[in-house]
Image (spheres, rainbow, N blue to C red):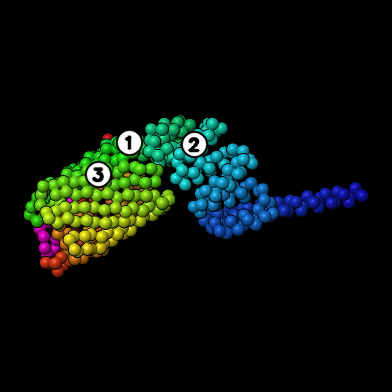
Amino acid sequence: MIHRYLCLILLSLLLTAEAFAQLDGLYQRARIQAHQGKYEEADLLLKSLLKEEPSHYDALFLQALITAWDGEYMPALRQLNTLMRQQGATRELVEAITRINYWAGENHKAVEEAENGLELYPENTTLMYLRARAQAAEQNYDAAIVGLEELLRLMPTNEEARALLKLLEVQRLKNTVGIEYMHAQFSNSFSPWHQVTASYSRKVPSALLVGRINYARMFDQQGIQAEIDAYPVINDKTYAYLNAGVSDASILPAFRWGAELYREIDQKWEASAGMRGLYFENAPVHVYTAQLGRYFPTYWISARGLLTTLEDNQHMGGLLTLRRFIEHEDRYVSLYLGSGATPLRVNSLIEVQRLDASWLGVDYQHPLGDRTWLLRTSLEVQQETYPEVRTTNRLAFSLQLQKRF
């Protein structure tokens, strides 16, 4: 009789061990699929596992991460918060909740979650780093820098934190001065164009202000224009562009203005719409524009449409932009493809009067030294059609140097 009971107990233990092994096998396969980016396959395996063991912590945690990796941040946070109520505030749960709030653009909430976690785990460098990232996203650079310095005292070898600290020390600088030269050469129509621009920008609370003086020489005439731009922040997801400029030269608009509203749809998409007004001698020009852009980890892609009106004439134009960030946001290369009569930026009245155009451009920006100096250069080729000239080819280049302080 005793032998029979022992055999039953042993058989039960063996079956239980086999069941756990099967569940563990499902979980390990799901982890591999998830880390290979095969989220649907991983989720199916986890659902099969959770059908047998609904309270399997590791499976529920991984399922929430996969949901977040797939861009569904709020459902992921709900599942993780449920796990936290059941399991308590474990390190991995606190870190995951903080990280996903940051991914979702909930920077204030991410800072709050990180600080709550640091009360439990005071030397958790992951939470310190995530808090600094969220604070930087809110442009609270001073607090982020203090936190990163504390992190580096605990972990001097953390190169990710050191790189972010260097970046924020530059980003918190409030002033920038710059000088730019632009030259355009035409194949069979106009004399060369020259433009020199001196600029000064300053960050103020909730806005960036930029002042510029432009000196232009076009059509064997010269003129000076003064401009000011403002980029006021309206809320966490919305900001605006405002512009005004004046000139006493006939080759430049006597008065110009611009306004555009930018709205972040989520952390991946941004849309904008606005208008520009340029008033030459007895020739008011209005430009209507809208843009849709998408962010990728190291790319920015946008499509912009433009409609220009001059008296009873209307011209359409479009521009595609592909920007590749190299290492960080201060170093990048951009490719521009444009088509249509409407120019992206009106330099003269004759450009508005052209019949058609197509253009290809590239620019490159490179930081120098400690990233307080920025060097940017561009090259552009346009084929244009004007009423008086059948076609002309334009080759333009520019060189710009900026200093932050």
Q: Tag 1's secondary structure?
A: loop
Does the magenta run of residues contain 37? no
Q: Residue at x 41, y 51 (%)?
A: 265
Three-letter amino acid code at disc 2? Glu
In the orientation shown, which residue stands out farthest toward the bottom?
390
Residue under label 1:
205
Residue nearer the viewer, 273 or 81:
273
Q: Earlier in the sequence, mark 2 or mark 3?
A: 2
Q: Residue at x 29, y 50 (%)?
A: 260
Asked if the residue under mark 1 is in contact with the one under mark 2, i.e. CB atoms within 8 Å, the reply is no
Q: Could you give the CA–CA distance between mark 2 and mark 3, rounded to whole angstroms?
A: 34 Å
Three-letter amino acid code at disc 3? Asp
Q: Is residue 159 left or right of residue 12?
A: left
The vertical placement of 397 against 179, above or below, is below
Residue under label 3:
229
Q: Position of residue 324 (x, y in %)?
A: 35, 53
Q: How many marks?
A: 3
> Residue 64: in sight, yes or no?
yes
Three-letter amino acid code at disc 1? Pro
Task: Using a 10 Å C-alpha cutoff, classify the residue at mark 2 as few (fewer than 14 neighbours), some (14 to 19) or many (20 or more).
Answer: some
Q: Which contiguous range is marked in magenta?
A: 182-192
Q: Quadrant of the C terminus?
A: top left
